[in-house]
Image: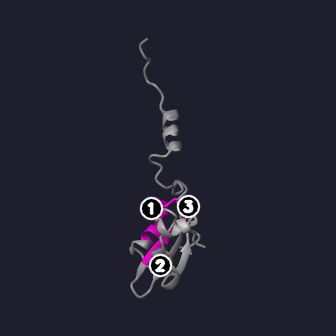
Amino acid sequence: MMGFKQIFTWWHNQTIGTFLKTIFFGKYVGKDIYGNRYYTRKKTKERWVIYKGNIESTKIPNDWYLWIHHTVDNLPSDNTDKDKFFWEKPHLENQTGKKTHKTKLKKDIKKKYESWK
């Protein structure tokens, strides 16, 4: 159920407007491997996503991205991992600006010179 904070702030997954639109007009169509839920409204052909956890548009996997932007009409299948090539890496959200990303970069940098003393 929605808490008081969630009613007035969009950064808690959805606003009250999105919540009401989902309840009255939304038809649940699927869920991706990250827990994001996808909905549609048949009359207007509108599609939207309710993110699980942090709201970040790069969390949408490629197959759902194509569907939500009306590039394809068929819903992504659950066995999309079987369709991938062996050299493809799993989808990750944009890591720019996160502490884990910065510390990983610093560890990967190796000096190619010696500092003067």
Q: Do residues under tags 3 and 2 come within 8 Å of each other at their CB atoms? A: no
Q: Look at label 1 and name its amino acid.
A: Ser
Q: Nearer the viewer, mark 2 or mark 1?
A: 1
Percent x, y of residue 67: 44, 73
Residue 74 is labelled as 2
- What's the CA distance linking mark 3 and mark 2? 26 Å
Please state, as top left, top right, bottom left or bottom right, where the C terminus lies in the image: top left
Q: Is residue 61 above or below residue 45?
A: above
At label 2, counting other C-alpha atoms closer than 10 Å, the crowd grade (few under 14, some 14-19, many 20 or more) is: few
Q: Earlier in the sequence, mark 3 or mark 2?
A: 3
- Label 1, secondary structure: give it: helix
Mark 2 element type: loop
The answer to whether residue 36 is magenta is: no
Q: Which residue is mark 1?
A: 57
**Disc 1: CA contacts within 10 A as few (<14), some (14-19) or many (>=20):** few
Marks 1 and 3, how far apart in space? 12 Å
Q: Residue furthest toward the front?
A: 4
Q: Are marks 2 and 1 in contact (CB under 8 Å)?
A: no
Within 10 Å of the Cα at label 3, are there few (<14), some (14-19), or many (20+) other Cα atoms?
few
| Residue holding disc 3 | 53
* Residue range highlighted in magenta: 47-67
Corner quadrant of residue 86: bottom right
The residue lying at 46 percent from left, 25 percent from top is 111
